[in-house]
Structures are given as structure tokens and as C-alpha cells.
């Protein structure tokens, strides 16, 4: 399973009758639009209550909005409800915007994807490595991710210059040689922001506004600031000891070009639709960004240049998600079906994560039917229980409890799997499936977990003779 797939698995006019906003209708007419909106609303309404942090959602098909609504509270202390035009931190979705700014310079022949970063940042200690712009964009540079460093976490509340942020990771040893493998690193996007400013003589914020925001009309998009008065900004929340608390103050100066943007779901939908045209980039640049990156070995990754490149139940997906104190986000496009879904939450401990919300909406838009559960007794469920050994020798458990079966990959995670037949089960809260393999006597010997991306993970059931007494 790839890092991208693992990240996904842990996880995923006005419709007056629903009090949610809509512009236009998808193919099939008004009745179909209302049906889809009803189903989406029925999925979200029970989860996000008015007195808790919530979510803003937008879904579009062929450039027309088919669902747009907010749930929950934008500010618990004032009792203000979330509305879909409100502004959230989008965290690492920022990387899409940084990548487009870089590709605009590539189109103008000001820089090249194969340029080494020392051409623009001559003092950066590459430690004998050849690090290119493409390596930074694709998370294959080997530069250590600064957000995991204790020194950065200890200073996360104070404002930073770009040089101060770079100093946190510049002298850290590389995790691997550039191009050797994929490893998500926000440090690479900090360096890209520094290169953008060095090459153009303008600030990152000026570049965004002049080359993206003003060009396509992103009217509620900002580089985040604690001090700046930002209209319609929602408050962010975290969980602590079972309580909801105000999320800690984090200076977005350090997030910079890797994760500092704020905007509404409306802006994300406008952004996505603009990328079908050529206002921002030509088709050749977009194809480059949206193709899996090729490593030195010739293998490809699940990331292009600024976008994750994956699939959902056989459909090509281009996406990015984000996580920062107080906020979770995801923006997913299905380019072949011209579908876009964005989900922004104002809690980093959301009741239902943005990926799960977005995938449920995508399934509805794609017309994927819900699976049907078959009845199975506790005695029958117990035949599947036990330890399952993966090829890397890690152990998963299958447990049964009160008529339910669970896949337990580690001590912190438990996923309910629902029987569809004697050997086929599906996830209650995701679009993954589990298939059990039987021997000639009908005893369970293996399981195969198939993720919604198509990735498959096999595990062998431990026999009684292998069990530790």
C-alpha cells in the first residue's frame, strides 16, 4: 500500500426545501438534483449538530453547483452557524496554488523543472545532492519535513520570516537521495515559496493575488494571519480530554507557501473550474502536474506536481487534503466525469473527516449504489476472528463484539466491517472491502483488503499451532 493510499484508508439557484444553495442543475433535470441533494443532506445532518464545530460542503458537476451547504457552528461562543461562503484555513491545499505559480514561471521560461534549487538559493546546504524544482514539487527531494521537528513545534506560535523557517530544516540530514522515493515534505514547498519570491522580487501573497486570485475572481481567498481582520472567518477547534477547546494559536507565517491559505468552498469550486480552461496554465503544464511522478527507479508515485494522483472505485482522482490546528480540508476532482467536491471543517477532530464526507458525496454523484447487509449471527462472525499476518510481519486482528465484526490494524484504530455475503464484507464508514478466503473445509485462511483506490493488502490468518501460548 502506498503512503497516499494509507493516508486515505485512515481515515474518508437554491434548493429551498433543504435550505441549501445551488446554482444550476446536473444532467437529468431538477428532480435528479433534488434527489442527490436530499441524499447528501441525509448523510450529513445527523453528524454535524448545531452546537458543535461543523463543515462547509460544495459539490459540482460539469461546472454547475449541485450541493452547497454549511452544518454546525462557526463560533461556539457566539452561536453562529456555518454558512457555505465562510472562510476556513485550507492548510496543504495551498500546495496546489504554489505549484501553479511555479508552472506559470516554467511556461514563461523563467525557470525549468530541472533547474537545481541552488541556482536560486545558492546558500542552501544541499549536502552534495542535486535537488531540482521537480523534486520539491513532487515530494521526492529527501529534504526533511520541518513540521515533524521538535524545534519547530516548540516555536509554532511565533511569527517567522521565510529564512527562519528554512533554518529549522536546512542542516538536517536528507532522508534519502533526491528522486529515490516519495515522502511528503512541506519543507519542499517552503523552498518553492522562497524561490518564487527570489525570482520575481514579489511576495508570495502578491504573486497569488496578481496571478491567481484576481485573474479568476477568488474574492474570499487570503494568506492567513492571526492579526488580519478577515470577513466571514470561522473559528477553529480541537479536542482535549474529551472536551472541545479553542485550537491553539499557530502562526501561519511558518506555513507560508506550504499551507497558509484561507478561503471558502465557493472559492475552491471556482479554482477547480478555472483549471479546466487556460486562464492559469496551458494543457501541457496541467498534464505534467496531474501525472504520477517517476522516480529514479522508473516506478511512479501517487503524487504529481502539487496534486495527489489516485483513484476512487475505478475513477481517476486528482486531489489534495490539509490538516492544521483547528481545521481539516479536502478538495477532490474527478476530471473524466467533471465532478468536484470540497469539504472544509473547523475542527481537527471532526465527527466525520472531510475525506469520508467527500467520498460519500462522490459515490452519490457517480450513482454508485449502497451495499446491502446480510444477517449473520455472533457464532458465524466468530469464525473470522483471529490474528492475520501481513507480508511485512505486522499483525492485524479481526474481532467480534455484540453482533458486529471489526478489523483492528493497531491499538488505536478499529473499523467495522459489514457482511455482504459469506466471504465479502464492506466498511461501514468507507468504501473499502474485505474478502475472506476459505480452504476446502470452509475454514478462513486469508483476508484481502481492497482500498477504494484499488490497492490491495493481503494477510494470512494465523493458525492455532502458530499462536503464542
Image (cartoon, rainbow, N blue to C red):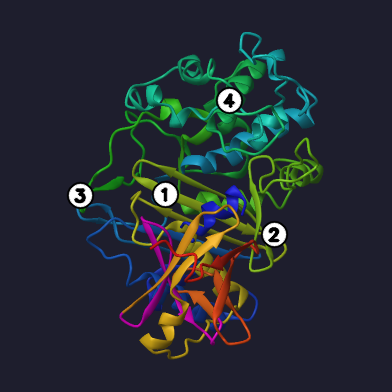
Q: Secondary structure at mark 2?
A: loop
Q: Measuring from the top left, give residue 258's x and y in whole percent.
A: 53, 33
Name the N-terminal-most of marks 3 and 2.
3
Calculate the distance from the C-alpha at mark 4 to the C-alpha at mark 3: 37 Å
Q: Tell me the quarter of the picture where residue 424 sits.
A: bottom right
Calculate the distance from the C-alpha at mark 1 to the C-alpha at mark 4: 22 Å
Give the left or right position of residue 60, taking residue 179 as reference: left
Residue at (34% x, 61% y) in the render: 351
Which residue was labeled with disc 1?
328
- Image height of 232 relative to 382, above or below: above
Residue at (49% x, 43% y) in the render: 219
Q: Secondary structure at mark 1?
A: strand
From the image, which quarter does the N terminus lie in? bottom right
In magenta segment, residue 404 = yes
4 or 3: mark nearer the eye? 3
Which residue was labeled with disc 3?
241
Residue at (20% x, 55% y) in the render: 79
Calculate the distance from the C-alpha at mark 1 to the C-alpha at mark 2: 23 Å
Which residue was labeled with disc 4?
193
- Image height of 253 relative to 32, above or below: above
CB atoms of marks 4 and 3 within 8 Å: no
Name the N-terminal-most of marks 4 and 3.
4
Q: Measuring from the top left, give residue 281's x and y in whole percent.
A: 73, 41
Q: Measuring from the top left, give residue 387's x and y in whole percent.
A: 46, 66
In magenta segment, residue 446 = no
| Badge 1 density bin: few <14, some 14–19, many ≥20, Cα 10 Å | many
Calculate the distance from the C-alpha at mark 3 to the C-alpha at mark 1: 20 Å
* Foreground pick, 138 / 276: 138
Which residue was labeled with disc 2?
335
* Foreground pick, 18 / 410: 410
Give the left or right position of residue 274, taking residue 236 as reference: right
Amino acid at each position: 500500500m502506498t503512503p497516499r493510499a494509507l493516508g486515505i484508508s485512515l481515515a474518508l439557484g437554491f434548493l429551498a426545501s433543504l435550505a441549501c444553495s445551488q446554482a444550476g442543475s446536473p444532467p437529468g433535470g431538477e428532480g435528479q438534483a433534488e434527489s442527490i441533494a436530499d441524499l447528501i443532506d441525509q448523510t450529513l445532518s445527523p453528524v454535524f449538530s448545531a452546537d458543535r464545530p461543523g463543515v462547509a460542503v460544495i459539490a459540482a458537476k460539469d461546472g454547475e453547483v449541485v450541493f452547497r451547504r454549511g452544518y454546525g457552528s462557526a463560533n461556539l461562543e457566539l452561536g453562529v452557524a456555518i454558512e457555505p461562503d465562510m472562510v476556513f484555513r485550507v492548510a496543504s491545499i495551498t500546495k496546489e496554488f504554489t505549484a501553479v505559480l511555479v508552472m506559470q514561471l516554467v511556461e514563461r521560461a523563467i525557470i525549468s523543472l530541472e533547474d537545481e534549487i541552488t541556482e536560486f538559493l545558492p546558500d542552501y546546504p544541499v549536502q552534495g545532492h542535486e535537488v531540482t524544482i521537480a523534486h520539491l514539487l513532487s515530494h521526492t527531494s529527501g529534504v526533511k519535513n520541518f513540521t515533524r521537528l521538535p524545534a519547530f513545534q516548540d516555536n509554532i506560535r511565533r511569527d517567522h520570516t521565510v529564512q527562519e523557517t528554512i533554518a529549522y530544516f536546512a542542516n538536517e540530514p536528507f532522508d534519502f537521495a533526491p528522486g529515490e522515493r516519495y515522502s511528503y515534505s512541506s519543507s519542499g514547498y517552503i523552498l518553492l515559496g522562497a524561490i518564487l519570491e527570489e525570482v520575481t522580487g514579489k511576495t508570495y501573497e502578491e504573486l497569488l493575488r496578481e496571478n491567481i486570485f484576481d485573474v479568476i475572481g477568488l474574492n474570499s481567498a487570503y494568506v492567513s494571519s492571526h492579526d488580519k481582520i478577515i470577513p466571514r472567518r470561522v473559528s477553529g477547534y480541537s479536542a482535549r480530554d474529551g472536551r472541545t477547546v479553542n485550537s491553539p494559536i499557530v502562526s501561519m507565517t511558518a506555513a507560508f507557501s506550504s499551507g497558509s491559505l484561507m478561503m471558502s468552498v465557493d472559492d475552491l469550486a471556482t479554482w477547480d473550474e478555472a483549471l479546466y480552461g487556460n486562464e492559469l496554465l496551458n494543457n501541457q503544464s496541467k498534464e505534467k502536474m496531474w501525472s504520477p511522478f517517476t522516480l529514479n527507479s522508473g516506478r511512479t508515485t501517487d503524487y504529481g506536481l502539487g496534486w495527489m494522483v489516485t483513484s476512487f472505485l475505478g475513477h481517476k482522482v486528482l486531489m489534495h487534503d490539509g490538516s492544521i490546528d483547528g481545521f481539516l480540508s479536502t478538495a477532490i476532482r474527478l476530471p473524466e466525469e467533471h465532478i468536484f467536491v470540497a469539504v472544509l471543517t473547523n475542527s481537527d477532530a471532526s465527527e466525520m473527516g472531510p475525506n469520508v464526507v467527500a467520498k460519500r458525496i462522490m459515490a452519490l454523484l457517480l450513482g454508485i449504489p449502497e451495499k446491502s447487509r446480510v444477517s449473520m449471527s455472533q457464532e458465524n462472525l466468530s469464525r473470522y476472528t483471529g490474528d492475520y499476518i501481513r507480508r511485512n510481519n505486522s499483525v492485524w486482528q479481526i474481532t467480534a463484539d455484540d453482533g458486529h465484526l471489526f478489523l483492528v490494524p493497531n491499538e488505536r484504530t478499529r473499523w467495522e466491517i459489514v457482511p455482504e455475503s459469506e466471504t465479502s464484507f464492506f466498511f461501514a464508514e468507507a468504501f473499502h472491502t474485505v474478502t475472506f478466503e476459505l480452504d476446502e473445509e470452509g475454514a478462513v485462511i486469508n483476508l484481502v483488503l481492497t482500498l477504494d483506490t484499488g490497492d490491495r493488502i493481503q494477510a494470512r490468518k494465523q493458525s492455532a499451532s502458530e499462536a503464542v501460548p
